[in-house]
Image (cartoon, rainbow, N blue to C red):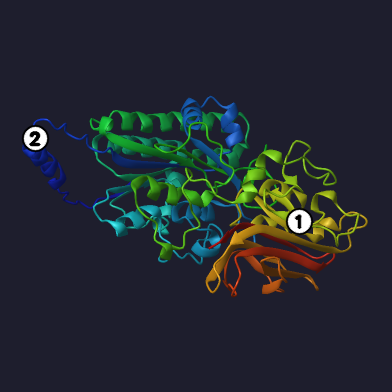
């Protein structure tokens, strides 16, 4: 075991001020209660399929899910990154996707941790008075700098050498002591045996037993928090997350496709998280922003995070369609139970399909509204999985899939926004997520129309624009009071696709 400690002295000035105020205050005034002290524990469980947690006897995970927020999401694929631990834990730690943090596999080649450090290191840089702690038994998470040397206390065991059962037990014991008897503000704890068992034995009975053992270890950590003498005056956020899943039933991960290897989750319980919440807009990168939000740390825009707090819902109008999504019609490769598409636009939006042919695959006739689960099941390993910055429900024009049925050889459709109020002479910005893959003569046009007038081209896509957050300036002409935004995908046949999400005009 390697332990690194950095002692710090902490001021008790605040308690002195409170005490002085209590002495000098008028006798008729009631003393104000002290605000709860914010604390965070993040527990990483490697290779954990939530569907298997549901079948296991896992009372601690079950209780967190019942009392907190559970958001499930799918991972990327090559060319962005493998569904492996290096990229997964890097995404959890840094709050950005692999196209920023640079880790594409377990070699950690290309890592950009200096630019995108882990959330504990961010806290140290914001305020060195934060007491930070990380404990891992996959040694590379420390040796490669996924969790950096800036952290006050780093505990490292070697699960490969000593075995992950033993190392997880040691990690748990050390962390219990630190949580109960020390005073960490933010901690990350890694437990790895579930991943080892799934690789060795698949996702059957031994894997279920490993989940149950890890759940008991989680229970020890939660018990240590509640045993703290200062617990009554503290506000704890507990987050549990996994880096990837495993194929079922054989185990394994790292590939693409639509199997359980790409499934992840972020489970969070604390003040501000809705009990029993099942948000559709949570992504794996959201752990860091969730930590910062709980501690009251404002995320600096210069950090360029892809992360948002799990307690904060996206305001995207497309997500309002989640309860109205349908099962497959022509896409027979998608399980009949999966709901994930609709042609009905959200309130205020519309879709022009007047130039579309009558044939083709029903689900993709013109702009449609879909989910990552449904869309990537339509056809795997064609970069659909790498629309990283979409969340929940998003809009798709997919000429490639539309052409998979007779009559779908041409595609021309326009997605039309509601009318936005604008001020003449001002400059507004169109901010949105785009995932556009170019082939042949296909074209993606972004245009605006003021007061119902002629369309004015703002941007034309004729080259790839993958997983990008676009921000386009638009000058509002004299006399204009309203503006409509239009996304036209046309000149397309058996080409690729265009995905749009989270349009904001401001």
Q: Dividing the picture into quarters, in which one does residue 302 lie?
A: bottom left
User: The residue tagged with tag 1: helix, strand or loop?
Assistant: strand
Task: Give the percent coordinates (x, y) of residue 84.
Answer: 57, 52
Q: Secondary structure at mark 2?
A: loop
Q: How many marks?
A: 2
The x and y percentages for residue 219 are 41, 29
**Mark 2 to mark 1 CA distance (whole Å):** 66 Å
Q: Is residue 383 visible?
A: no
Left or right: 194, with 260 as reference point: left
Q: Residue at x 72, y 74 (%)?
A: 462
132 left or right of 449? Answer: left
- Residue identified by numbered label 1: 351
Q: Which mark is residue 453?
A: none
Q: Which residue is drawn at the image coordinates 56% and 71% (left, top)?
A: 424
Please indicate whether residue 427 sits to the left or right of residue 14 in the image: right
Mark 2 vs mark 1: in front: 2
- Residue that carries the numbered disc 2 in the rendered image: 26
Q: Quadrant of residue 235?
A: top left
Against 286, residue 461 (above or below) is: below
Q: Position of residue 490 (x, y in %)?
A: 79, 67
Is residue 110 rendered to the left or right of residue 175? right
Label 2 Cα crowd, 10 Å radius (few <14 / some 14-19 / many 20+): few
């Amino acid at each position: 075991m390697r332990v690194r400690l950095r002692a710090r002295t902490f001021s008790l000035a605040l308690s002195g001020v409170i005490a002085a105020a209590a002495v000098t205050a008028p006798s008729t005034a009631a003393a104000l209660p002290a605000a709860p002290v914010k604390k965070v524990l993040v527990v990483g469980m490697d290779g954990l399929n939530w569907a298997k947690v549901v079948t296991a006897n896992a009372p601690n995970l079950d209780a967190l899910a019942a009392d907190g927020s559970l958001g499930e999401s799918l991972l990327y694929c090559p060319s962005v990154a493998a569904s492996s631990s290096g990229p997964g834990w890097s995404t959890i730690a840094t709050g950005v996707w692999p196209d920023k943090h640079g880790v594409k596999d377990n070699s950690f080649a290309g890592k950009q941790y200096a630019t995108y450090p882990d959330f504990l290191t961010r806290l140290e840089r914001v305020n060195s008075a934060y007491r930070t702690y990380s404990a891992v038994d996959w040694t590379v998470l420390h040796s490669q700098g996924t969790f950096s040397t800036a952290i006050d206390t780093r505990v490292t065991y070697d699960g490969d050498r000593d075995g992950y059962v033993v190392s997880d037990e040691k990690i748990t014991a050390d962390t219990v002591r630190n949580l109960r008897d020390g005073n960490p503000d933010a901690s990350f704890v890694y437990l790895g045996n579930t991943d080892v068992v799934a690789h060795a034995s698949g996702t059957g009975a031994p894997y279920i037993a490993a989940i149950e053992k890890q759940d008991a270890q989680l229970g020890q950590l939660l018990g240590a928090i509640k045993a703290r003498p200062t617990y009554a005056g503290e506000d704890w956020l507990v987050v549990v997350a996994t880096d990837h899943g495993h194929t079922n039933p054989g185990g394994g991960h790292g590939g693409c496709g639509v199997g359980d290897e790409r499934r992840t989750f972020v489970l969070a319980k604390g003040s501000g998280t809705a009990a029993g919440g099942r948000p559709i807009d949570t992504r794996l990168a959201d752990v860091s922003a969730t930590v910062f939000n709980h501690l009251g740390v404002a995320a600096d825009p210069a950090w360029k995070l892809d992360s948002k707090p799990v307690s904060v819902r996206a305001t995207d109008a497309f997500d309002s369609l989640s309860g109205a999504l349908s099962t497959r019609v022509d896409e027979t490769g998608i399980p009949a139970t999966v709901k994930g598409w609709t042609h009905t636009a959200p309130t205020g939006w519309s879709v022009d399909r007047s130039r579309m042919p009558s044939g083709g695959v029903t689900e993709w006739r013109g702009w449609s509204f879909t989910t990552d689960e449904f869309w990537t099941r339509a056809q795997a390993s064609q970069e659909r999985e790498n629309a990283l910055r979409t969340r929940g429900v998003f809009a798709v024009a997919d000429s490639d899939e539309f052409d998979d049925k007779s009559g779908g050889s041409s595609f021309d459709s326009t997605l039309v926004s509601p009318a936005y109020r604008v001020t003449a002479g001002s400059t507004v910005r169109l901010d949105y997520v785009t995932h556009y893959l170019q082939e042949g003569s296909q074209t993606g046009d972004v245009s605006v129309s003021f007061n119902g007038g002629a369309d004015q081209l703002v941007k034309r896509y004729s080259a790839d624009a993958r997983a990008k957050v676009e921000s386009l300036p638009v000058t509002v002409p004299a006399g204009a009071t309203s503006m409509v935004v239009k996304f036209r995908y046309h000149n397309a046949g058996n080409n690729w696709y265009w995905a749009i999400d989270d349009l904001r005009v401001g």
